[in-house]
Amino acid sequence: MATEVKQTTRAQESTNAIERLYITMRHLLNRGFYKPSGVSGNALRSALLLLRPEIYGTIAEDKAELNGLIYVLERLPEGIEECRFINLTSDEGFSKSHLKPIVPPKRRRNCYRIDDEQMNIEITRGRSDIYDILTHLTFLFIESGKICKRVLVDDGNATIRDWDKLSEFVLKEEKTEDEREVALIHLANILSRTFDEVGEIYHKLKTPEDPDRFLNVMYWLGKLAIEEETTGNKRTITFSPLLRERLGHHLHGEKWALTIKQTLMKKGLFQRPIHIISANMHSVMNSLFAKKALAKDFEDTDSLKIFEALSSEKNKNLNKKVQEHAQKNGMIFLDDTSGTNIDVQIFDTAQFGKGSCCYETPEGTPEEEKPVIFVMDYAFGEQAYETIDELLKPLEEGDQKHFLNVDSVSIMGKAGILEGGKGDLMIPSAHIFEGTADNYPFNNELCANDFEGHGLKVLEGTMVTVLGTSLQNKDILKFFHESTWNVIGLEMEGVHYQKAVQSASQIRKSINKDVKVRYAYYASDNPLETGSTLASGGLGTTGVKPTYLITDRILKQIFNS
């Protein structure tokens, strides 16, 4: 009797699409180049269209995806839409040239416009950075193709009137407001969007330097796609030989870690109990000192208002006060020069002046047992393994090896939640690595009870470490959430941190085998809710309460350990 073949589910198809994207991108990196309109570029495009990531909305439809466009443009260098040649490089000394780095607002990477046609993007944060860029570029090429398909007529020998009028406006030097509105009407027709929708995105993208940025971006995306179709001038993505040679060798992480260990040794902190925290560059410093430093500026220093004020760009003077207070009381700031883009703060609690800090070590604690709090800025994907793995290795001086006295490693950050809303909390008990059988259970020093009574939803369970924020859709996430994996959220670094901690403590024996670990995340988005993805915008002040609540719990455990 013939058995019925079970139909592939959308979740399985999506998983296969992610695997194909991942394998294709690794193949292209090894090969050294590809053309977006060639066989390899089409393979990436097909896989992304099959996956239909939640963050890219209507990518698989004929109409343009506008929110996804903003998300991508915030993470790629300004002007990239004008470049036919995009070259991914390692740190190859461009900073010493006359070229000024272009840094995308939502990704810390240096990019250089070499000439009218070429953009170089420096990769110093590992493969995750490459996957991120290639996924965003593929999205842009898909949107670019939609424009080309809409405006080319008569077998590619002519363009529609809307395109001609848009081109005329973009290339004009003097522009009036009425002409701008007319150009937006023409663009709305090309993009199959309403004038309202196009106008909204126009205002979101406009800057004082480039008020017509949206119109310019769409024009150049269309122009290069049309030229590709009509003249054969293909766009090309290349990976420099030096990047391919250096990738995976921890060059930047090693340099970063060495600077830190030499600083700790120089300051006599190497043998003190060290507590590593991966967080932003403000919450630990503010939690330690803000209420004391700003006592005269706020009547009620026990409320969240003080932290909300410090999170505002308008209050740089308050931030400066806290920073100066921290530096007077033992804070060392290490500005990154290694290329990792990970700054560091070191807090020597033995240097805290009387009454200067909001936390205290138990009375009678000897100076040599007072904690040293080491705060590192967020890593990006696989970079988390590179940096922590290098940091936890012993410092070698001649024949001598100096081992760090690491007491705890705490990871706090933003993540996507699968049940709840922005600002809610996730406390993981294990990390699983998407697309592999790798899983990392651990004993988390934090638990849901630590956060009860604060009006936030708190979930405990498994977190998935994903290859990229752009490579998810509802089908995969529903499978994770509803299956026996008991997945509560997704993020990009957990597996990589835990892998480094486990290998250092259990295999290499370079740190204490009983090192304490703490993981806690707050929700930056809910990818299962339409309108609540990362493309819907930032957290605003919603993130203040969970950020400082997690920081407070971590610091209380450190000071009372």
Image (cartoon, grey):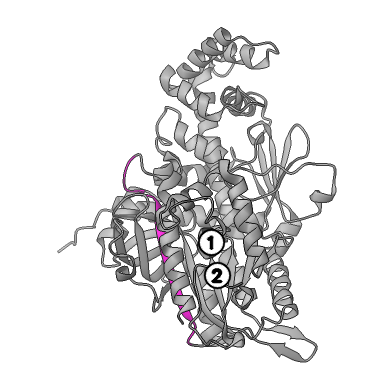
Describe residue 473's horizontal placement relative to residue 272 as left or right: left
Q: Position of residue 312 (x, y in %)?
A: 53, 44
In the image, the segment drawn in magenta is: 514-530
Residue lying furthest left in this view? 1
Image x and y of residue 186, in percent: 50, 14
Considering depth in this image, is 147 or 132 the residue closer to the camera? 132
Give the mark nearer the N terminus: 1 vs 2: 1
Crowding at mark 2 (Cα within 10 Å: few <14, some 14-19, many 20+)? few
Q: Is residue 169 magenta?
A: no
Q: Is residue 131 above or below residue 162?
A: below
The image quadrant that residue 152 belongs to is top right
Q: Position of residue 365 (x, y in %)?
A: 54, 86
Residue to which mark 2 is pinned: 355
Q: Which mark is residue 246?
A: none
Position of the N terminus, as image quadrant, is: bottom left
Check contact, mark 1 vs mark 2: CB within 8 A: yes
Query: CA gap, disc 1 to disc 2?
Result: 8 Å
Local SS, label 2? loop
Q: Is residue 142 above or below residue 169?
A: below
What amino acid is labelled 2 in the image? Gly
Q: Residues within 10 Å of mark 1 (few under 14, many from 20)?
A: some
The residue lying at 46 percent from left, 31 percent from top is: 66
Kindly identify which residue carries mark 1: 292
